[in-house]
């Protein structure tokens, strides 16, 4: 864990030196590289030059306020931003999130909680940007919307593609019809649950001769993707 975090840089933009130092100590103990800026304009310049993996941004900053700085940063990049604020008013939290922040923490806070929230946001972002799924001899590229088996391209409909992606995110796990509907279609599926059987039947056909071996029926339970060893 330590080695993995060491390649990740956190930028703290906070004018209270005591709080900034406190956060820096805890984040560095957790294995992150940490830089600190004490005002909005310096923070903006640091964000542009350092390209941090995540920014901890105070709401109340001299020279350039946190809300405006957050808007500028969000217009320029997708860097994760956690807003730090001493204000407990609901409207201030909404303003922070509306300006593009991914999360917010109200002062006073436990620095260990901040570290945990930083790790949670980074995990979520990393999961969202994962564009290529690999399971055995199957490769699925979400961005390009391409599937191949043993480097052989496979043409799939949108429904078949999203179903296969759901299976590949949960290999060797039995998935019920309801679970497949939720995972593949976000519950936006008005047909009877048995209609999922037809989609899976067509998906198997598109996968070719090994389709039934790849997606197996678990009678009385659902379906399971069993990929060949790569």
Image (cartoon, rainbow, N blue to C red):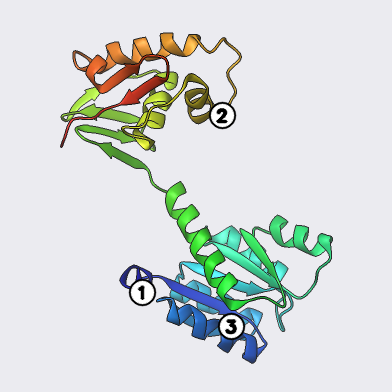
Q: How far apart are marks 2 and 1 (CA)?
A: 36 Å
Q: How crowded is mark 1: few (under 14 residues within 10 Å), some or many (20 or more)?
A: some
Q: In which quarter of the image is residue 88?
A: bottom right
Q: Which residue lies furthest to the bottom in this view?
A: 18
Q: Which residue is drawn at 49% across and 9% down?
A: 195
Give the secondary structure at mark 1. Answer: helix
Q: In this view, does 137 lie above or below 83?
A: above
- Residue at mark 2: 186
Q: In which quarter of the image is the C terminus?
A: top left
Tell me which label, 3 or 1, sits earlier in the chain. Answer: 1
* Eye-nearest disc, 3 or 1: 1
Q: Which residue is drawn at 26% across and 34% down?
A: 139
Q: In which quarter of the image is residue 101?
A: bottom right
Residue 42 image label: 3
Asked if the residue under mark 1 is in contact with the one under mark 3, i.e. CB atoms within 8 Å, the reply is no
- Indicate left or right for 147 with 127 as reference: left
- Residue at mark 1: 6
Closer-to-camera residue (64/168): 168
């Amino acid at each position: 864990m330590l080695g993995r975090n060491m390649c990740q840089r956190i930028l703290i933009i906070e004018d209270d030196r005591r709080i900034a130092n406190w956060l820096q100590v805890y984040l560095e103990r957790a294995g992150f590289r940490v830089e600190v800026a004490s005002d909005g304009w310096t923070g903006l310049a640091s964000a542009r030059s350092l390209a941090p993996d995540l920014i901890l941004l105070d709401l109340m900053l001299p020279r350039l306020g946190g809300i405006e700085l957050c808007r500028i940063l969000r217009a320029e990049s997708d860097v994760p931003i956690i807003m730090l604020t001493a204000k407990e008013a609901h409207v201030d939290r909404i303003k922070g999130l509306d300006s593009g922040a991914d999360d917010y923490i109200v002062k006073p806070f436990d620095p260990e909680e901040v570290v945990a929230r930083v790790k949670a946001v980074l995990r979520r972002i990393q999961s969202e940007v994962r564009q290529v799924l690999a399971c055995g001899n199957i490769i699925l590229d979400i961005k390009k919307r391409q599937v191949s088996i043993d480097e052989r391209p496979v043409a799939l409909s949108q429904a078949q593609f999203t179903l296969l992606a759901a299976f590949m995110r949960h290999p060797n796990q039995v998935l019920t019809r309801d679970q497949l509907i939720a995972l593949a279609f976000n519950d936006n599926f008005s047909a009877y649950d048995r209609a999922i059987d037809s989609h899976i039947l067509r998906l198997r056909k598109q996968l070719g001769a090994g389709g039934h071996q790849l997606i197996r029926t678990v009678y009385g339970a659902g379906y399971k993707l069993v990929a060949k060893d790569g």
